[in-house]
Image (cartoon, helix red, strand yellow):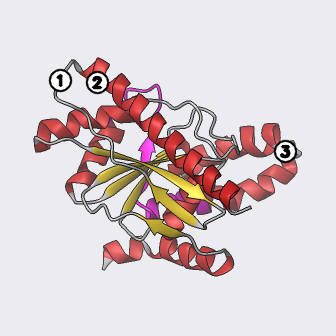
Amino acid sequence: MGHKNKKRLFRLCRTCFRFFTRRYHVSSGYTEPAVYVVHHQNMKGPVTCMAWMDMPLIPWVLHVFCDKRACFRQYYDYTFTRRFGLPKAVAAIIVLPLSSFVSRLMKSMQAIPVFRGSINIIKTFRLSFSALNKGKSLLICPDIDYASTDTAMGQMYDGFLNLEKYYFREKGRHLGFIPLHISDRDSCIYAGKTVYFNNCGDFRTEKSKVYDRIRREFLRLESRDMQNASEQE
């Protein structure tokens, strides 16, 4: 009962979002716990996936959005004042209720806080493996330029690939990494081919190869979407 109550806010928000936006279909039959990788696109990627993918997904979220006070500082000190250019008094009025709502929503989604450049990143990986071990999949947006609205995935942080170490050590099998491409033309979330680590070579070398294979899979999905659009014009 408690678990259902915790997820109630997320389910309510998802229902409202689905009601007021167009439907996205999902082309994925993958059932094993995996890491889904999507282009952030200034919130479009994670919001669309969390709204329309029915499988249990646990998103990675920058840690400041998982804590009310830290969320307030992020919105007040940067997002609404420096980025949007609002006067501080106006920003405070908006940010106070917003930071409370966002942090509560993150808890409702069971979001995993990401502590970049901190020793607390160990907590991120521990919580991630716990979710995978329970049969849930992760949703990660590793964009370096998260505010980019370009439809193509740009350069990515590669730290999330270290999840393979935890998973293989405990499970004895490789963790799947699945690129997702959101096509507005088709109103569809396309799942690419699952990318796995190989047993050969040291981890650092293999990690670089997996990163390249994920990038190539994103390019394949994006090129196919553009080609389909050209054929229908």
Q: Is residue 102 left or right of residue 175?
A: right
Q: Nearer the viewer, mark 2 or mark 3?
A: 2
Residue at x 36% of width, y 76% of height: 4
Residue carrying label 3: 88
* Magenta residue span: 101-122
- First in sequence, mark 1 or 3: give its number: 3
> Which residue position is annotated with label 1?
200
Mark 1 is surrounded, within 10 Å at the Cα level, by few (under 14), some (14 to 19) or many (20 or more) other residues, namely few
| SS for callout 3 | helix
Left or right of residue 219: residue 124: left
- Residues 53 and 124: in front is 53
Label 2 to label 1: alpha-carbon separation: 8 Å
Percent x, y of residue 195: 33, 41
Number of the label disc, if any, that sits on residue 206:
2
Residue at the image position 63 percent from the left and 81 percent from the top: 19
Residue 221 part of the magenta-drawn span: no
